[in-house]
Amino acid sequence: MKRLRVKDKPKKKTKREVHISKVLIYTGVVALILFLSIYFLIILSLKLADSTKVNGSNQYLLSQTKDDTNTTLVVLESGNDEAKKISEAYLFLTNKNKEESILIYIPGWIYYGGLEEDFGNSVAVSSFRYAGDFLQEGRGIEYSIWQIGQMLGIKVDNYIWFSPDSVKSYSSIYGDTSGVEDKLREYYKVSGEDALNDPFFKLSTMSSRYSVLKNMLGISKLIGLSKFGSSNLSFTEYLDFFANLNNTVSSTETYGIDLSFFRYSTEDLSSSGGQIRYINTTEFDNVYRGLIAKIIDRSLEKERVRVEIYNGSGVAGAAKQFGRKIENAGCDVVRYENAPTTIDRTVLYIADEVSFANSLKVVSEVLSGSYDLVKGRPDFMTTGDIVVVLGQDIKQMYSF
């Protein structure tokens, strides 16, 4: 009889299953976190040069008062070496609390007729930097910010300066900024019969091209962008400006002023015999003041201040220049006169500091805080709520 053989069942081997998909996901998450960490570290470490800090000119070129209204000047250059010039500039003002904004386009070809003392004739916006470097080497950017402020009668909070190289860097990261998308035209209103020409929309086009994804893909080019530009903003604030510009424009009632439109300039002969166009500051002020009334802080509106300005500085036309900035900031200037005598230091007289506290801030900002404050009135006849007597100390603001 055959014996029945019983075979032992083979023992099952325990296998550790490897889930490749999970490994890939975990690896991807770790890689993403590492990449984002490096990205943010690089972004936070990047800095822009600030030309206004070198000589301390930021104290009088840029507003030091923080309120609901924010004003940013953006200047774009083109060309190379000696042919380098300002091609266009933009001034963006916004009050998000009142949901009102203004964008001003400044073409490089427009002339400003206030520089004859230094250069013998008017100077185009395109040549402002060259003119400033001619007066004092290396101070062309400061000079340009100052003269654009003088030309418009506006003091800005922030500035962003694009050299030709930074313009190229911006385009290489975000794409071509020429052309106008139809939707951008819908964002802006105009005053009366004004029109907005295509160059007006370039800043909005730059904003529409911006994306964080492009930042990440072009991180090495961002480093180059930070080296070529100049601004008083941090690099993250600089990027935020372009990230948020169109959102601000579309979410607020935004008016456009295009200085290339014929009503804002007058044609005349240049000293060399050619035809040039000068900015018509009277026409600009009329339109701008109608719009700025929508933007200024409500507390300033309520005060309805009356300001008088007297020139005791020895600088011709200074009362009108400072007074224009005060009016364009939302205060009413009722008188411009020469002071009885020349004085060393500017004096600001105010009879009621409490009732005109916000107006006092505006006037103080235009004067860059450089004055003696006196509660009362000067020893000559005045009727204003605030009286400014300009002294010779304001010459430091013209020290280019």
Image: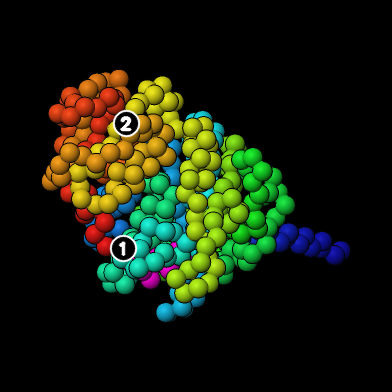
Picture quadrant of residue 40: bottom left
- Amino acid of disc 2: Val
Q: Which residues are magenta?
A: 125-132
What is the spatial separation of the Cα atoms under label 1 and label 2, in whole angstroms? 28 Å
Q: Which residue bears the numbered disc 1?
A: 117
- Residue at 31% across / 38% down in the picture? 336
Q: Which label sits in the foreground, 1 or 2? A: 1
Q: Is residue 131 magenta?
A: yes
Residue 260 or 113: which is nearer the viewer? 113
User: On the picture, is 238 further left or further right than 202?
Assistant: left
- Amino acid of disc 1: Glu
User: On the picture, is 345 further left or further right than 154?
Assistant: left
Q: Please provide percent x and percent y for residue 18.
A: 63, 60
**Residue 162 visible in the shown view:** no
Residue 289 or 138: which is nearer the viewer? 289
Indicate which disc, 1 or 2, sits on the residue closer to the N terminus.
1
| Quadrant of the drawing holding the C terminus | bottom left
What is the tally of numbered marks visible in this picture? Answer: 2
Q: Please provide percent x and percent y for residue 8.
A: 72, 60
